[in-house]
Amino acid sequence: MNRINKRFETLRQQGRKALIPYLVLGDPARDVTLPVMHAMVKSGADIIELGVPFSDPTAEGPVIQKAHERALLNGSSLRDALALVAQFRETDPDTPVLLMGYANPIERMGYETFIAAAVSAGVDGVLTVDLPPEEAEEFNQHLGKAGIENIFLLAPTSSNDRQKMVTGMAGGFIYYVSLKGVTGAGNLDVASVKQHVDHIRSLTDLPVCVGFGIKDGASARSVAELSDGAVVGSVLVNRMAGLAEAGESDPAAYASAVSELITEMRNALDN
Amino acid sequence: MNEKMNIDFSQVPDARGHFGPYGGRFVSETLIYALDELERIYRSLKDDPEFQAQFDYDLAHYVGRPSPLYFAERWTRETGGARLFLKREDLNHTGAHKINNTIGQALLAKHTGKRRVIAETGAGQHGVATATVAARLGLECHIFMGEEDVHRQSLNVYRMKLLGATVIPVTSGSKTLKDAMNEAMRDWVTNVDDTFYIIGTCAGPHPYPELVRNFQSVIGREARQQSLAQAGQLPDALVACVGGGSNAIGLFHPFLEDESVAMYGVEAGGFGLATGKHAAPLNDGIPGVLHGNRTYLMEDENGQIIETHSISAGLDYPGVGPEHAWLKDIGRVNYVTIDDDEAMDAFRRLTKVEGIMPALESSHAVAYAEKLARQMDPEQMIVVNLSGRGDKDILTVAEIDGITL
């Protein structure tokens, strides 16, 4: 069984919600990512969402855009992401890792080459922001054969027909985008999130997790109560950016700063 | 139906916006509904006589169409070879072909009831054309422009401001057209309920490449009729510059099934193809996904989009409209390059021999047409799309000449 499904199964049995933190590979330096991933797990992350740097991250707000730019400056690429997951797996065989990114680096590598490398590295899921179901048929077939879950987004603007189509194709979990906007934007409208999540749940047995606009323990809890988990990105990336701007070069400092935030959110979800 | 190629060009793209393997709709989920809505409105109005009549009326009375097809006699004599005709899109209101498309999209925006329009711009021509139609219809207008281009094209920035638009300098990435488009897409996803995105070229997610092509095809329809009326023949060759490629597709499309008409799309060779510093994805790129469509791109071995270079801001873009990508693959259009220096020489030559100052973008087409004409016979005929006027480029040219104005 895929690690993502296994993890949700365990969470369901424990009556707990998933906490899914995001970071960008190579942000701000190549040696920071691995220790931060391990620290995330230690402080209570259930699934790691590893962002693959791209030159044109059109779905990202300014905070995550800058993270992509910092990572590209040190040459971090999709190939490095795969190598890093393999390294992560040496000491963590259990925590699911999903790669979040854009279609072009995968297109450049080629679907089959990418998927073979992802399987051997121990990647569990892929979320490609600009590869909606209509354009993902071929990719989806390859992923399915390899046992890697294709995570799809649903948005407040998704029609009922699309929600049906997407839930029919998706694996792992449904990533519900809580707002109209880019990552890191705006404020949560919890009532609207509830309405949409309830509807998605009526269409599928897949877990539904909510991302975009989650800033702290309280907002993580408010969406997790309505769904199966919370995805947290910009607030973590922003904390790391603060250290980077202050010239911090010790990976342990990044790990401990991120741990602090994750611990707070974990506690908010569990208590 | 083109019998030799056995392709019915009017049936392309398919229902999902694919031109062969290119085009499509590669956007995040939030935007799908806006694209569906746009497609629905476009389909319902496309063949609506009232909509078409309004579009034609605006093109005639506001833009000043038809634009002339001008036989450039002296330029032909000086060049030697085939007769050179200029399709004078530079004479349109606002000075370029861009207005054909913004008139059309603004009419669509009006039908959606949205009160705010946004656009990306490189050289500023599309920004000016959007700000112009927004002023006319009383719409709020925000223009995204790379910081680099804001400096290069300060005249157009000021024009947009005078027209009541807000110009937002984009400081991310390479600070040029591609980043302006990224930022416009981010704005759109955030304000999708009340905002209409007027894309300036025949690229982006479906249905933009198709609808921009159809609005710009007025260029080719006129040129076809004018060639027959004025020269008694179809042109032997068409030449147009290609950045995103909207002026080129507008000229080419109505001729695609005329087998005898050769077509040349001229990309920006920058410092020369061999230097890697250019903006010629069809000549030196590979297929990939950017800005909502699959097409030829300038990218590195990791699939990162790389910075392009061209003397002309309007061609300084790492992608190209998906229909051009397809027309290249099937061999219907030849895509060639002209470098910065050749374009500058052509700019000066046409200005001196005809008293017509071409935009630096269009100067690429002018330069290639000269090369082509010399290989052809005097009874043959070339139509060059003079897509825009060069007034906006005067500061750039003066700087090259070492003159401060």
Image: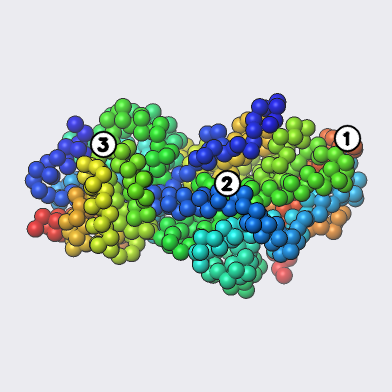
x 34%, y 55%: residue: A156
| Left or right: where A94 falls relative to B193 | left
Number of residues whose C-alpha sits closer than 10 Å to that of mark 1, classed few (under 14), some (14–19) or many (20 or more)? few
Residue at 52% x, 34% y: name it: B21
Which amino acid does the dot numbered 2 rest on?
Pro
Vertical relation: A175 (above or below) A142: below
* Residue that appears at 37% across and 50% down: A159
SS assignment at label 3: loop
Residue B347 x/y as whole percent? 77, 53
**Which residue position is annotated with label 3?**
A124
Under mark 3, the amino acid is: Asp
Query: Badge 3, how many Cα within 10 Å: few under 14, some, many 20+?
Result: many
Front in this rendered view, residue A151 or B125 = A151
Q: Quadrant of residue B227?
A: top right
Q: Tags 2 and 3 in contact by the CB under 8 Å rule?
A: no
Residue identified by numbered label 2 = B209
Question: Between marks 2 and 3, how big is the CA–CA gap?
Answer: 36 Å
Toward the viewer: B261 or A127?
B261
Q: Nearer the viewer, mark 2 or mark 3?
A: 2
Separation of marks 1 and 3 at Cα, in angstroms: 64 Å
- Is residue B347 visible in the rendered image? The answer is no
Mark pair 2, 1: CA separation:
35 Å
Does B45 sit above or below residue A125?
below
Per the rendering, the mark at residue B314 is none
Q: Nearer the viewer, residue A163 or B330?
A: A163
Q: In screen coordinates, is B84 left or right of A258? A: right
Q: What is the secondary structure assignment of the residue under circle 1? A: loop
Residue tagged 1 = B377
Colour scheme of the picture = rainbow
